[in-house]
Image (cartoon, rainbow, N blue to C red):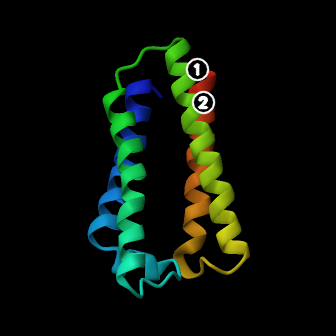
């Protein structure tokens, strides 16, 4: 896969989650077994979208990056991000925080980690 295709795909996924968690957190989180029960939890969901949206922006704005040192550093950072996502969401599933559709988050981060690793190897 080209860097452009990968980063467009990666950025769009993060953008969709960012928008969903900002605009409809009371619909999204209960599917994962997490309850939005007050204005503080609602805000924390929206606050999380700062980072998700930032990752989307970085991925989409750098989609034309060519193979080289900078691309390698970008993909290394994205790999770290996705591995952390996998570890944290696996923890949430094992401890019972994520139930229901919660299994999809570790799967999502593991798959993105694999694709990111493969893209990193091409640099």
From what the image shows, is residue 5 above or below residue 110?
A: above
Alpha carbon separation for disc pair 2 and 1: 12 Å
- Element type where label 2 sits in the image: helix
Q: Which residue is mark 1?
A: 122
N-terminal label among 2 and 1: 2
The mark closer to the camera, 2 or 1, is: 2
Q: Nearer the viewer, residue 104 or 95?
A: 95
Q: Residue at x 51, y 77 (%)?
A: 32
**Where residue 116 sits: x, y (%)?**
57, 36
- Badge 1: how crowded within 10 Å, few (<14), some, or many (20+)? some
Residue 102 position in % (x across, y down): 56, 73
Q: Residues within 10 Å of mark 2 (few under 14, many from 20)?
A: some
* Most foreground residue, 71 or 112: 71
Q: Which mark is residue 76?
A: 2
Which quadrant would the C terminus be assigned to in this image?
Answer: top right
Left or right position of 88 against 74: right
Say if 30 sits above or below 109 in the image: below
Q: Position of residue 25 (x, y in %)?
A: 35, 74
């Amino acid at each position: 896969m080209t860097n452009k295709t990968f980063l467009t795909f990666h950025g769009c996924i993060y953008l969709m989650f960012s928008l969903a968690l900002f605009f409809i957190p009371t619909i999204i989180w209960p599917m994962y077994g997490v309850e939005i029960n007050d204005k503080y939890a609602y805000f924390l969901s929206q606050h999380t979208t700062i980072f998700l949206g930032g990752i989307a922006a970085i991925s989409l704005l750098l989609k034309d990056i060519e193979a080289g040192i900078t691309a390698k550093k970008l993909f290394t950072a994205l790999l770290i991000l996705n591995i952390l996502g996998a570890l944290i969401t696996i923890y949430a599933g094992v401890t019972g925080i994520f139930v229901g559709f919660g299994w999809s988050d570790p799967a999502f981060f593991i798959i993105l980690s694999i694709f990111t690793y493969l893209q990193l190897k091409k640099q």
